[in-house]
Image (cartoon, helix red, strand yellow):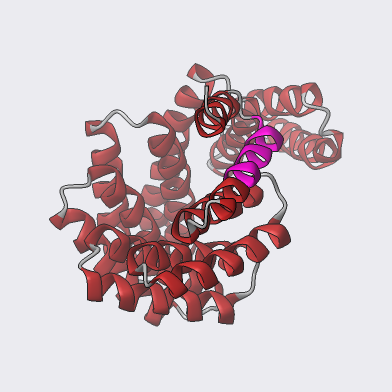
Amino acid sequence: MSNALQLQRRLRLALQNDDYDEAILCLQEAAALARAEGDHDTEGRYLGNLALMCHRAGRSQEALDYFRQALVLVRAEGDRITEDGLLGNMGSVLRELGQLDEALKHLNQALLIAQEIGDIRGRGIWLSNLGLAHDDLGQPQQALLYHQQAVEVARDLHDQRGQASRLSKLAATCTSLRDYEQAQRSFTESIDLYRQIDDQAGLLETLISAGQFQRVWGQALENAAEAQIHFQKTYDYHMEALTLARRHGEIRLQAELLLSLGTEVGNRGKYAQAITYFTESAHLFAELGLVQRLPEIHKNIDTAMSLQKEH
């Protein structure tokens, strides 16, 4: 078996087993093999994949170094398609690292190339990440424009999963702008899409975010009766999320959601129910070894018990 075929087999097995160290070693060897053969374009692509794998393994500085090496090679070869992907992925990594000015620079360069070469799918991804970068910078008005365009790209491509994800991001930005009506419409559409495609991980994440949003909206209202409508929606969303978290064995999420549910029912005077939720939450946090969360929850239990006695 040739070295290239052996490396491909090792890499495939490493990825199946989430063995990042082995995957990184395989990609390093593959890049070296391409370099020895004088195939700099292929070497650049391997280095780009190596960068992404290093980032996934938590070796972010190495990832940035490999991205830079890859860019030099593919630019020398005039490979605009690979350059587009490298710039965009590097921008996304830089955003996650908090290097936002550099992230914007790389994402904007990727966006220009995507428009030039007709990479519609890439354009949607870079628009979405530009929106997130502006969110991180506290610039929701700029972020809004990018998220809206990213949603439309996904819609045009009939990419329901991408559309659902981007609608949730758009909703978060609308919440920052206090455009609660638009945020609600975006969250609702996102949830509906996740249900249609049976993406339970995406649905779970969005139900949690939608519940938190309804709490924010309720707290912004002066009319107590109107506020209670939104607090009830928080409860409903988080109860559905709890059902999904239990189905998939997400213990940490269950603990957090039970804490949220306890707060919601406690604020409505349902103290016995609140105590039940808080107690189950405390049990799960203790099971996970997250004992630092217990004093807060025990204080909530004590408060609920005191209020229960008064009523």
The quadrant in which residue 302 appears is top right
Question: Which residue occupies 48% across, 17% down?
Answer: 247
Q: Residue at x 75, y 33 (%)?
A: 301
Q: Main secondary structure of the magenta part?
A: helix
138 or 63, which is in the foreground?
63
Q: Nearer the viewer, residue 222 or 74?
A: 74
Comparing 20 with 32, the one in front is 32
* Residue pictured at 39% horizontal, 59% vertical: 169
Residue 44 at x, y = what percent?
51, 59
In the image, the segment drawn in magenta is: 19-30
Give the mark count.
Answer: 0
Residue found at the very far front of the displayed protein: 37
Q: Is residue 49 above or below residue 80?
A: above
Judge whether residue 221 can be spotted in this image. no
On the picture, is 93 further left or further right than 165?
right
Residue placed most toward the observer, 133 or 214: 133
* Residue 191: image location, x then y, percent: 30, 42
Res 100 quadrant in image? bottom right
Q: Quadrant of the C terminus?
A: top right
The residue positioned 41% from the left and 70% from the top of the image is 77
Indicate the position of residue 152 as horizontal and vertical percent values. Answer: 19, 62
Residue 25 included in the magenta stretch of the image: yes
Q: What percent of the width, then of the height, locates residue 29? A: 64, 42
Decide whether residue 20 is among the magenta residues: yes
Residue 123 in view (yes/no): yes
260 shown above or below 79: above
